[in-house]
């Protein structure tokens, strides 16, 4: 899912793909795409936060 989102330009600025386009490419529903991307992003940001100190 992440690879498809990246390949379609979802993380480009400006964004080049929508949840609907990613859903069509993966055969999943738009809601499922949204949930998966949100969980992936939470995992990435959480891992970036590990080992940092509050400032």
Image (tube, grey):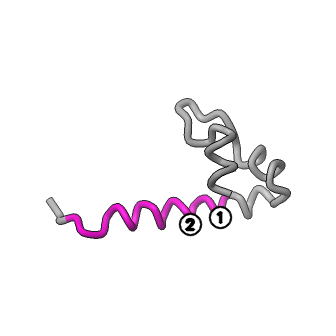
Say above or below: 29 vs 22: below
Question: In this view, which residue lies farthest toward the left?
Answer: 55
Q: Residue at x 41, y 61 (%)?
A: 45
Callout 1: SS: helix
Q: Are there few (<14), some (14-19), or many (20+) residues within 10 Å of tag 2?
A: few
Whether tag 2 and tag 1 are in contact, CB under 8 A, the answer is: yes
**What main secondary structure does the magenta stretch of the protein show?**
helix
Image position, residue 41 (x, y; %): 51, 59
**Quadrant (top left, top right, bottom left, bottom right) of the C terminus:** bottom left
Residue appearing at x 53%, y 32% in the figure: 13
Determine whether 10 is above or below 34 in the image: above
Q: Does the segment drawn in magenta span residue 41?
A: yes
Q: CA distance from mark 2 to mark 1?
A: 6 Å
Where is mark 2, residue-wise?
Answer: 39
User: Where is residue 20 drawn, in percent x and y?
Assistant: 77, 47
The residue wearing badge 1 is: 35
Measuring 38% from the left and 66% from the top, which residue is drawn there? 47
- Residue 52 circle label: none
Residue 12: name its quadrant. top right
* Residue 54 pos. (x, y %): 17, 64
33 sits to left or right of 54: right
Q: What range is drawn magenta here?
A: 34-52
In percent of width and height, residue 2 lies at 62, 55
């Amino acid at each position: 899912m992440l690879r498809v989102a990246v390949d379609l330009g979802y993380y480009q600025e400006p964004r080049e793909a929508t949840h609907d386009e990613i859903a069509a490419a993966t055969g999943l529903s738009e809601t499922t795409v949204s949930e998966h991307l949100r969980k992936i992003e939470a995992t990435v940001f959480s891992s970036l936060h590990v080992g940092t100190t509050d400032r």
